[in-house]
Image (tube, rainbow, N blue to C red):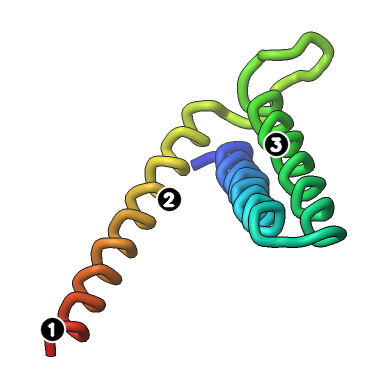
Amino acid sequence: MSGVAVESIFLSTLLLSFAATLLLAGLFGAYYGKGRSRSLGITLALVAVLLGGLFCALTWPLLQGITPIFDPEAVGRALAAVGAATIGFAVALGVFIFIVVRS
């Protein structure tokens, strides 16, 4: 695997996972917060959407003037691996919770 692909995998996964986590945290704060917490949650969600757009622009040629630096094939493979790991984690957690609740 070339150095560019490794950088594409690491940086793109880092950027996308940060944006997704920030979006979930922001939406949680916007929904359950009151006053200032709600406005901060909305701000975090908007920043997350912008970061997600940056991820897309750095992966695929979507915007004129922004040259993609991530290898789309490597990013796709990395996202598939992260998705598979997340599904595996969720299934294992579900089995664990089911066994604990049933005993």
> Crowdedness of circle 1 by 10 Å Cα count: few (<14), some, many (20+)?
few
Disc 1 designates what residue?
102
Q: Is residue 42 among what the camera can see? A: yes
Q: Residues within 10 Å of mark 2 (few under 14, many from 20)?
A: some
Q: In this view, does 74 lie to the left or right of 100?
A: right
Q: Nearer the viewer, residue 18 or 42?
A: 42
Task: In the displayed orientation, state which residue is furthest to the left.
Answer: 103
The picture places residue 40, in percent across and down from the top left corner, at 82, 55
Residue 80: horizontal and vertical position, in percent?
Answer: 39, 41
Residue at the spot of label 2? 82
Residue sitting at the far right: 36
| Residues at circles 2 and 3 in contact by the CB criterion of under 8 Å | no
Q: Name the residue under label 3.
A: 49
Q: Assign the C terminus to one quadrant of the image.
A: bottom left
Calculate the distance from the C-alpha at mark 2 to the C-alpha at mark 1: 30 Å
Element assignment for label 2: helix
SS at circle 3:
helix
